[in-house]
Amino acid sequence: MKKETQLIHAGRSKKWTGSAVNPPLVRASTIVFDTMQELKDATKQRGNRVPFYGRRGTQTHFAFQEAMCELEGGAGCALYPCGAAAISGALLSFLKQGDHLLMVDTAYEPTRGLCDKILAGLGITTTYYDPMVGAEIEQLIQPNTKVIFLESPGSLTMEVQDIPAICQVAKAHNIITILDNTWASPILCRPFELGVDIAIQAATKYIIGHSDVMLGTATATSACWPTLREHSYLLGYCASADDVYAASRGLRTLSVRLKQHEQNALIIAKWLAARPEVEAIRHPAFEDSPGHAFFRRDFSGSNGLFSFILKQGSSEQVQAFIEGMQHFKMGFSWGGYESLITATMNVQALRTVTSWPYSGPLIRLHIGLENPDDLIDDLAQAFARFAMR
Ligand SMILES: *Cc1c(COP(=O)(O)O)cnc(C)c1O
Protein backbone atom coordinates (compact mmCIF):
# COMPACT_ATOMS: atom_id res chain seq x y z
CA MET A 1 0.00 0.00 0.00
CA LYS A 2 1.29 3.48 -0.84
CA LYS A 3 1.73 6.08 1.91
CA GLU A 4 -1.24 8.20 0.82
CA THR A 5 -3.56 5.17 0.98
CA GLN A 6 -2.08 3.96 4.26
CA LEU A 7 -2.88 7.30 5.90
CA ILE A 8 -6.53 6.86 4.97
CA HIS A 9 -6.78 3.36 6.43
CA ALA A 10 -4.46 3.61 9.45
CA GLY A 11 -6.20 2.78 12.74
CA ARG A 12 -9.61 2.51 11.10
CA SER A 13 -10.24 -1.20 11.54
CA LYS A 14 -13.90 -2.08 12.22
CA LYS A 15 -12.88 -3.14 15.71
CA TRP A 16 -12.53 0.55 16.58
CA THR A 17 -14.87 2.36 14.17
CA GLY A 18 -17.91 0.05 14.17
CA SER A 19 -20.13 1.40 11.42
CA ALA A 20 -18.79 4.97 11.52
CA VAL A 21 -16.02 6.27 9.27
CA ASN A 22 -13.91 7.54 12.17
CA PRO A 23 -12.82 5.94 15.44
CA PRO A 24 -15.07 7.16 18.29
CA LEU A 25 -14.23 9.86 20.83
CA VAL A 26 -14.40 7.99 24.15
CA ARG A 27 -13.56 9.99 27.26
CA ALA A 28 -13.03 7.92 30.39
CA SER A 29 -11.24 7.72 33.68
CA THR A 30 -13.03 4.66 35.05
CA ILE A 31 -13.82 1.58 33.00
CA VAL A 32 -16.54 -0.57 34.62
CA PHE A 33 -16.88 -4.38 34.58
CA ASP A 34 -19.90 -6.63 35.17
CA THR A 35 -18.15 -9.67 36.59
CA MET A 36 -15.00 -10.51 38.52
CA GLN A 37 -13.93 -12.64 35.58
CA GLU A 38 -14.16 -9.70 33.15
CA LEU A 39 -12.09 -7.56 35.49
CA LYS A 40 -9.51 -10.36 35.85
CA ASP A 41 -9.27 -10.79 32.08
CA ALA A 42 -8.89 -7.06 31.55
CA THR A 43 -6.18 -6.93 34.20
CA LYS A 44 -4.25 -9.63 32.38
CA GLN A 45 -4.68 -7.85 29.05
CA ARG A 46 -4.07 -4.28 30.25
CA GLY A 47 -1.52 -2.62 28.03
CA ASN A 48 -2.74 -4.61 25.01
CA ARG A 49 -5.31 -2.12 23.73
CA VAL A 50 -8.02 -3.39 26.08
CA PRO A 51 -10.09 -0.91 28.14
CA PHE A 52 -8.88 -1.17 31.77
CA TYR A 53 -8.37 2.27 33.29
CA GLY A 54 -8.41 5.75 31.72
CA ARG A 55 -4.66 6.25 31.96
CA ARG A 56 -4.20 3.12 29.82
CA GLY A 57 -6.44 4.67 27.14
CA THR A 58 -9.79 4.13 25.46
CA GLN A 59 -10.80 3.08 21.93
CA THR A 60 -9.85 6.60 20.77
CA HIS A 61 -6.28 6.07 21.96
CA PHE A 62 -6.06 2.47 20.75
CA ALA A 63 -7.09 3.41 17.21
CA PHE A 64 -4.46 6.18 17.03
CA GLN A 65 -1.76 3.99 18.59
CA GLU A 66 -2.48 1.30 16.03
CA ALA A 67 -2.36 3.91 13.25
CA MET A 68 1.06 5.14 14.39
CA CYS A 69 2.43 1.58 14.40
CA GLU A 70 1.09 0.97 10.90
CA LEU A 71 2.68 4.20 9.65
CA GLU A 72 5.99 4.34 11.50
CA GLY A 73 6.42 0.58 11.75
CA GLY A 74 6.79 -0.12 15.49
CA ALA A 75 5.14 -2.78 17.64
CA GLY A 76 3.55 -0.38 20.13
CA CYS A 77 3.05 3.35 20.61
CA ALA A 78 3.01 5.26 23.92
CA LEU A 79 1.14 8.57 24.09
CA TYR A 80 2.26 11.68 25.99
CA PRO A 81 0.84 15.15 26.67
CA CYS A 82 3.47 16.71 24.34
CA GLY A 83 6.62 15.93 22.38
CA ALA A 84 8.93 16.96 25.23
CA ALA A 85 7.16 14.44 27.51
CA ALA A 86 7.66 11.71 24.88
CA ILE A 87 11.40 12.47 24.95
CA SER A 88 11.65 12.42 28.76
CA GLY A 89 9.37 9.35 28.95
CA ALA A 90 11.50 7.38 26.49
CA LEU A 91 14.82 8.39 28.09
CA LEU A 92 13.63 7.68 31.64
CA SER A 93 12.40 4.24 30.52
CA PHE A 94 15.90 3.12 29.49
CA LEU A 95 18.29 5.07 31.76
CA LYS A 96 19.00 4.72 35.46
CA GLN A 97 21.54 6.04 37.96
CA GLY A 98 25.09 5.40 36.78
CA ASP A 99 24.19 5.11 33.09
CA HIS A 100 25.66 7.14 30.24
CA LEU A 101 23.80 8.76 27.34
CA LEU A 102 25.15 9.86 23.94
CA MET A 103 23.14 12.90 22.83
CA VAL A 104 23.36 14.63 19.45
CA ASP A 105 24.80 18.16 19.73
CA THR A 106 22.05 19.59 17.51
CA ALA A 107 19.18 18.37 19.71
CA TYR A 108 16.04 20.39 20.31
CA GLU A 109 16.95 22.84 23.08
CA PRO A 110 14.62 21.43 25.79
CA THR A 111 16.06 17.93 25.14
CA ARG A 112 19.50 19.28 26.03
CA GLY A 113 17.99 21.00 29.07
CA LEU A 114 16.53 17.67 30.23
CA CYS A 115 19.99 16.04 30.07
CA ASP A 116 21.84 18.89 31.78
CA LYS A 117 19.26 19.81 34.41
CA ILE A 118 17.33 16.62 35.21
CA LEU A 119 19.20 13.51 34.05
CA ALA A 120 22.48 14.87 35.50
CA GLY A 121 20.77 15.22 38.88
CA LEU A 122 19.67 11.56 38.70
CA GLY A 123 23.26 10.42 38.21
CA ILE A 124 22.95 9.90 34.44
CA THR A 125 25.84 11.42 32.48
CA THR A 126 25.57 12.82 28.95
CA THR A 127 28.21 13.15 26.24
CA TYR A 128 27.22 15.28 23.26
CA TYR A 129 28.31 14.14 19.80
CA ASP A 130 28.70 15.71 16.35
CA PRO A 131 25.56 14.97 14.27
CA MET A 132 27.84 13.99 11.33
CA VAL A 133 29.82 11.44 13.39
CA GLY A 134 28.38 8.33 11.66
CA ALA A 135 30.02 5.01 12.60
CA GLU A 136 32.80 6.90 14.43
CA ILE A 137 30.35 7.15 17.31
CA GLU A 138 31.86 3.85 18.44
CA GLN A 139 34.82 5.79 19.90
CA LEU A 140 32.47 7.67 22.25
CA ILE A 141 30.88 4.57 23.75
CA GLN A 142 31.63 3.92 27.41
CA PRO A 143 31.06 0.65 29.31
CA ASN A 144 27.92 2.21 30.87
CA THR A 145 26.47 3.76 27.67
CA LYS A 146 22.83 2.64 27.51
CA VAL A 147 21.18 5.00 25.00
CA ILE A 148 22.17 6.89 21.84
CA PHE A 149 19.74 9.70 21.06
CA LEU A 150 19.42 11.02 17.50
CA GLU A 151 17.49 13.92 16.02
CA SER A 152 17.57 14.16 12.25
CA PRO A 153 17.60 16.73 10.76
CA GLY A 154 18.98 18.70 13.73
CA SER A 155 16.95 21.51 15.27
CA LEU A 156 17.56 24.90 13.59
CA THR A 157 20.69 23.83 11.67
CA MET A 158 19.18 20.82 9.84
CA GLU A 159 22.11 18.36 9.72
CA VAL A 160 20.85 14.96 8.49
CA GLN A 161 22.44 12.06 10.39
CA ASP A 162 23.66 8.70 9.08
CA ILE A 163 20.98 6.87 11.08
CA PRO A 164 21.77 3.28 9.88
CA ALA A 165 25.52 3.63 10.59
CA ILE A 166 24.86 4.83 14.15
CA CYS A 167 22.19 2.17 14.79
CA GLN A 168 24.48 -0.60 13.56
CA VAL A 169 27.18 0.41 16.05
CA ALA A 170 24.57 0.71 18.81
CA LYS A 171 23.24 -2.80 18.12
CA ALA A 172 26.73 -4.30 18.29
CA HIS A 173 27.08 -2.80 21.80
CA ASN A 174 23.55 -3.57 23.01
CA ILE A 175 22.68 0.12 23.19
CA ILE A 176 19.14 1.43 22.64
CA THR A 177 18.69 4.06 19.91
CA ILE A 178 16.00 6.73 20.23
CA LEU A 179 15.28 9.02 17.27
CA ASP A 180 13.39 12.31 17.45
CA ASN A 181 11.65 11.80 14.10
CA THR A 182 9.39 14.86 14.28
CA TRP A 183 10.68 16.60 11.13
CA ALA A 184 9.86 13.56 8.97
CA SER A 185 6.38 13.14 10.50
CA PRO A 186 5.30 9.47 10.37
CA ILE A 187 5.62 9.34 6.56
CA LEU A 188 8.87 10.86 5.22
CA CYS A 189 11.22 8.39 6.92
CA ARG A 190 10.86 4.72 8.02
CA PRO A 191 12.87 4.74 11.27
CA PHE A 192 12.57 1.04 12.10
CA GLU A 193 13.88 0.01 8.68
CA LEU A 194 16.94 2.16 9.45
CA GLY A 195 17.53 0.23 12.70
CA VAL A 196 16.06 2.62 15.28
CA ASP A 197 14.55 1.11 18.47
CA ILE A 198 12.26 4.00 19.45
CA ALA A 199 10.88 6.78 17.22
CA ILE A 200 9.50 9.96 18.73
CA GLN A 201 7.00 12.39 17.28
CA ALA A 202 5.97 15.78 18.56
CA ALA A 203 2.48 15.15 17.14
CA THR A 204 1.94 18.81 18.06
CA LYS A 205 3.60 19.59 14.71
CA TYR A 206 2.45 18.05 11.40
CA ILE A 207 0.18 15.27 12.73
CA ILE A 208 -2.08 17.79 14.45
CA GLY A 209 -1.25 20.32 11.74
CA HIS A 210 -3.42 23.19 12.98
CA SER A 211 -1.42 24.69 15.89
CA ASP A 212 -4.17 23.94 18.40
CA VAL A 213 -3.20 20.74 20.27
CA MET A 214 -0.07 19.44 22.02
CA LEU A 215 0.65 15.71 21.89
CA GLY A 216 3.63 13.34 21.80
CA THR A 217 4.19 9.75 20.69
CA ALA A 218 6.95 7.17 21.12
CA THR A 219 6.75 4.09 18.91
CA ALA A 220 8.94 1.11 19.81
CA THR A 221 10.19 -2.24 18.51
CA SER A 222 8.64 -5.35 20.07
CA ALA A 223 11.79 -5.77 22.21
CA CYS A 224 11.53 -2.24 23.69
CA TRP A 225 7.76 -1.86 23.81
CA PRO A 226 6.97 -3.57 27.17
CA THR A 227 9.56 -1.47 29.04
CA LEU A 228 8.58 1.78 27.32
CA ARG A 229 4.88 1.11 27.94
CA GLU A 230 5.20 0.18 31.63
CA HIS A 231 7.72 2.88 32.56
CA SER A 232 5.71 5.59 30.83
CA TYR A 233 2.57 4.31 32.54
CA LEU A 234 4.23 4.34 35.97
CA LEU A 235 5.55 7.86 35.36
CA GLY A 236 1.92 8.86 34.83
CA TYR A 237 2.10 9.91 31.20
CA CYS A 238 -1.17 9.94 29.31
CA ALA A 239 -3.03 12.07 26.75
CA SER A 240 -6.62 13.33 26.57
CA ALA A 241 -9.04 11.52 24.27
CA ASP A 242 -10.00 14.83 22.62
CA ASP A 243 -6.39 15.58 21.71
CA VAL A 244 -5.83 12.06 20.41
CA TYR A 245 -9.02 12.30 18.34
CA ALA A 246 -7.61 15.46 16.70
CA ALA A 247 -4.38 13.57 15.94
CA SER A 248 -6.25 10.70 14.24
CA ARG A 249 -8.12 13.24 12.15
CA GLY A 250 -4.89 15.05 11.30
CA LEU A 251 -3.41 11.88 9.80
CA ARG A 252 -6.02 11.78 7.03
CA THR A 253 -4.77 14.98 5.37
CA LEU A 254 -1.10 14.69 6.35
CA SER A 255 0.15 13.66 2.94
CA VAL A 256 -1.58 16.43 0.95
CA ARG A 257 -0.58 19.06 3.49
CA LEU A 258 3.05 17.92 3.50
CA LYS A 259 3.27 17.94 -0.29
CA GLN A 260 2.07 21.55 -0.35
CA HIS A 261 4.39 22.57 2.51
CA GLU A 262 7.27 20.91 0.65
CA GLN A 263 6.49 22.57 -2.68
CA ASN A 264 6.03 26.04 -1.14
CA ALA A 265 9.18 25.73 0.97
CA LEU A 266 11.33 24.69 -2.00
CA ILE A 267 10.10 27.70 -4.02
CA ILE A 268 10.96 30.06 -1.18
CA ALA A 269 14.29 28.43 -0.30
CA LYS A 270 15.38 28.74 -3.95
CA TRP A 271 14.32 32.39 -4.01
CA LEU A 272 16.29 33.04 -0.81
CA ALA A 273 19.36 31.23 -2.18
CA ALA A 274 19.54 33.83 -4.98
CA ARG A 275 19.40 36.83 -2.60
CA PRO A 276 22.72 38.65 -2.16
CA GLU A 277 22.16 39.01 1.62
CA VAL A 278 22.00 35.22 2.12
CA GLU A 279 25.14 33.27 3.02
CA ALA A 280 23.69 29.74 3.05
CA ILE A 281 20.48 27.73 3.05
CA ARG A 282 20.03 24.86 5.52
CA HIS A 283 17.41 22.67 3.86
CA PRO A 284 18.04 18.89 3.66
CA ALA A 285 16.99 18.84 -0.01
CA PHE A 286 19.77 21.34 -0.90
CA GLU A 287 22.97 19.68 -2.08
CA ASP A 288 25.25 21.76 0.15
CA SER A 289 23.19 21.15 3.31
CA PRO A 290 25.08 18.74 5.64
CA GLY A 291 23.94 15.13 5.28
CA HIS A 292 22.16 15.75 1.96
CA ALA A 293 23.28 12.30 0.71
CA PHE A 294 21.66 10.64 3.78
CA PHE A 295 18.52 12.68 3.15
CA ARG A 296 18.38 11.37 -0.43
CA ARG A 297 18.96 7.82 0.77
CA ASP A 298 16.64 7.69 3.82
CA PHE A 299 13.82 10.22 3.30
CA SER A 300 11.04 10.27 0.74
CA GLY A 301 10.58 14.05 0.77
CA SER A 302 10.87 17.28 2.73
CA ASN A 303 8.44 19.62 4.48
CA GLY A 304 7.95 23.32 5.24
CA LEU A 305 10.72 23.80 7.82
CA PHE A 306 14.20 25.11 6.95
CA SER A 307 16.70 27.82 7.92
CA PHE A 308 18.88 30.36 6.16
CA ILE A 309 21.91 32.29 7.33
CA LEU A 310 22.50 35.96 6.56
CA LYS A 311 26.00 37.13 5.58
CA GLN A 312 25.82 39.70 8.36
CA GLY A 313 23.20 41.59 10.33
CA SER A 314 22.90 43.46 13.63
CA SER A 315 20.14 42.57 16.08
CA GLU A 316 18.43 45.86 15.07
CA GLN A 317 18.50 44.78 11.43
CA VAL A 318 17.14 41.33 12.29
CA GLN A 319 14.43 42.95 14.37
CA ALA A 320 13.49 45.16 11.41
CA PHE A 321 13.43 42.07 9.19
CA ILE A 322 11.14 40.05 11.44
CA GLU A 323 8.82 42.72 12.80
CA GLY A 324 6.20 44.06 10.43
CA MET A 325 5.72 40.80 8.55
CA GLN A 326 2.28 40.43 7.09
CA HIS A 327 2.04 36.67 6.65
CA PHE A 328 4.91 35.20 8.68
CA LYS A 329 4.02 35.25 12.36
CA MET A 330 6.80 35.35 14.94
CA GLY A 331 6.65 32.35 17.23
CA PHE A 332 7.91 28.93 18.19
CA SER A 333 6.70 25.54 17.09
CA TRP A 334 5.86 24.66 13.49
CA GLY A 335 3.85 22.13 11.50
CA GLY A 336 0.59 24.09 11.42
CA TYR A 337 -1.00 25.47 8.25
CA GLU A 338 0.50 28.93 8.82
CA SER A 339 3.92 30.42 8.14
CA LEU A 340 6.23 31.22 11.06
CA ILE A 341 9.56 32.98 11.52
CA THR A 342 12.16 33.03 14.30
CA ALA A 343 15.76 34.32 14.47
CA THR A 344 18.83 33.07 16.34
CA MET A 345 21.71 35.53 16.66
CA ASN A 346 24.17 33.10 18.26
CA VAL A 347 23.85 29.50 17.09
CA GLN A 348 27.21 28.57 18.67
CA ALA A 349 25.75 29.22 22.14
CA LEU A 350 23.42 26.24 21.58
CA ARG A 351 26.28 23.81 20.71
CA THR A 352 29.03 22.38 22.88
CA VAL A 353 31.08 19.96 20.73
CA THR A 354 30.63 21.23 17.17
CA SER A 355 31.67 24.59 15.81
CA TRP A 356 29.15 26.59 13.83
CA PRO A 357 30.81 27.89 10.67
CA TYR A 358 28.83 31.12 10.17
CA SER A 359 28.95 34.47 11.96
CA GLY A 360 25.72 36.01 10.61
CA PRO A 361 22.28 35.49 12.16
CA LEU A 362 20.21 32.38 11.40
CA ILE A 363 16.56 32.74 10.46
CA ARG A 364 14.26 29.73 10.61
CA LEU A 365 11.10 29.65 8.54
CA HIS A 366 8.12 27.38 8.64
CA ILE A 367 6.44 27.71 5.27
CA GLY A 368 2.69 27.32 5.54
CA LEU A 369 -0.06 26.71 3.02
CA GLU A 370 -0.38 30.33 1.82
CA ASN A 371 0.35 31.12 -1.83
CA PRO A 372 4.17 31.32 -2.04
CA ASP A 373 3.97 34.55 -4.11
CA ASP A 374 2.50 36.33 -1.09
CA LEU A 375 5.20 34.89 1.16
CA ILE A 376 7.94 36.03 -1.23
CA ASP A 377 6.46 39.57 -1.27
CA ASP A 378 6.53 39.50 2.53
CA LEU A 379 10.19 38.43 2.57
CA ALA A 380 11.17 40.99 -0.10
CA GLN A 381 9.72 43.76 2.10
CA ALA A 382 11.60 42.32 5.08
CA PHE A 383 14.89 42.58 3.15
CA ALA A 384 14.02 46.21 2.32
CA ARG A 385 13.45 47.01 6.03
CA PHE A 386 16.71 45.17 6.84
CA ALA A 387 18.65 47.32 4.36
CA MET A 388 17.20 50.61 5.73
CA ARG A 389 18.56 49.98 9.25
C1 LIG B 1 8.52 20.85 18.97
C2 LIG B 1 9.52 19.78 19.08
C3 LIG B 1 9.55 18.94 20.19
C4 LIG B 1 8.67 19.15 21.39
O1 LIG B 1 7.31 18.99 21.13
P1 LIG B 1 6.22 19.68 22.08
O2 LIG B 1 4.95 19.03 21.70
O3 LIG B 1 6.28 21.14 21.81
O4 LIG B 1 6.62 19.36 23.50
C5 LIG B 1 10.47 17.93 20.20
N1 LIG B 1 11.33 17.74 19.18
C6 LIG B 1 11.32 18.52 18.10
C7 LIG B 1 12.28 18.24 17.00
C8 LIG B 1 10.43 19.57 18.00
O5 LIG B 1 10.46 20.37 16.94
Image (tube, rainbow, N blue to C red):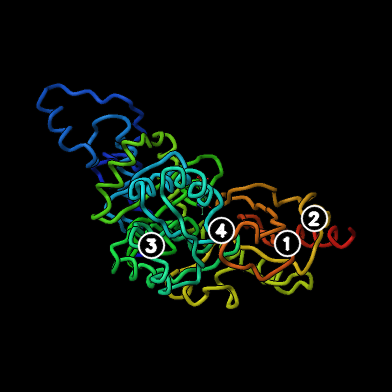
CB under 8 Å between callouts 2 and 4? no
CB under 8 Å between callouts 3 and 1? no
Amino acid found under the numbered disc labelled 1? Pro
Q: Which residue is mark 4?
A: 155
Q: Pick the residue in front: 347 or 362.
A: 347
Q: Pick the residue in front: 307 or 112.
A: 112
Q: Which residue is mark 2?
A: 315
Q: Answer whether residue 12 is visible to the viewer in this image.
A: no
Amino acid found under the numbered disc labelled 4? Ser
Could you give the CA–CA distance between mark 3 and mark 1, rounded to whole angstroms? 37 Å
Q: Which residue is mark 1?
A: 361
Residue 114 in the figure: left or right of residue 80: right
Q: Earlier in the sequence, mark 3 or mark 2?
A: 3
CB under 8 Å between callouts 2 and 1? yes
Is disc 4 placed on a helix, strand or loop? loop
Could you give the CA–CA distance between mark 4 and mark 1, rounded to whole angstroms? 15 Å
Q: Residue at x 82, y 59 (%)?
A: 314
Q: Position of residue 130 (x, y in %)?
A: 51, 67
Q: Earlier in the sequence, mark 3 or mark 4?
A: 3
Could you give the CA–CA distance between mark 3 and mark 4, rounded to whole angstroms? 25 Å
| Disc 4 residue: CB within 8 Å of ligand 1 | yes
Q: Closer to the camera: disc 3 or disc 1? A: 1
CB under 8 Å between callouts 3 and 2? no
Q: Position of residue 333 (x, y in %)?
A: 58, 48
Is disc 1 placed on a helix, strand or loop? loop
Is 201 drawn above or below residue 20 in the view shown?
below
Q: Closer to the camera: disc 3 or disc 2? A: 2
Q: Earlier in the sequence, mark 3 or mark 1?
A: 3
Q: Position of residue 1 (x, y in %)?
A: 31, 64
Q: Which residue is mark 3?
A: 3
Amino acid found under the numbered disc labelled 2? Ser
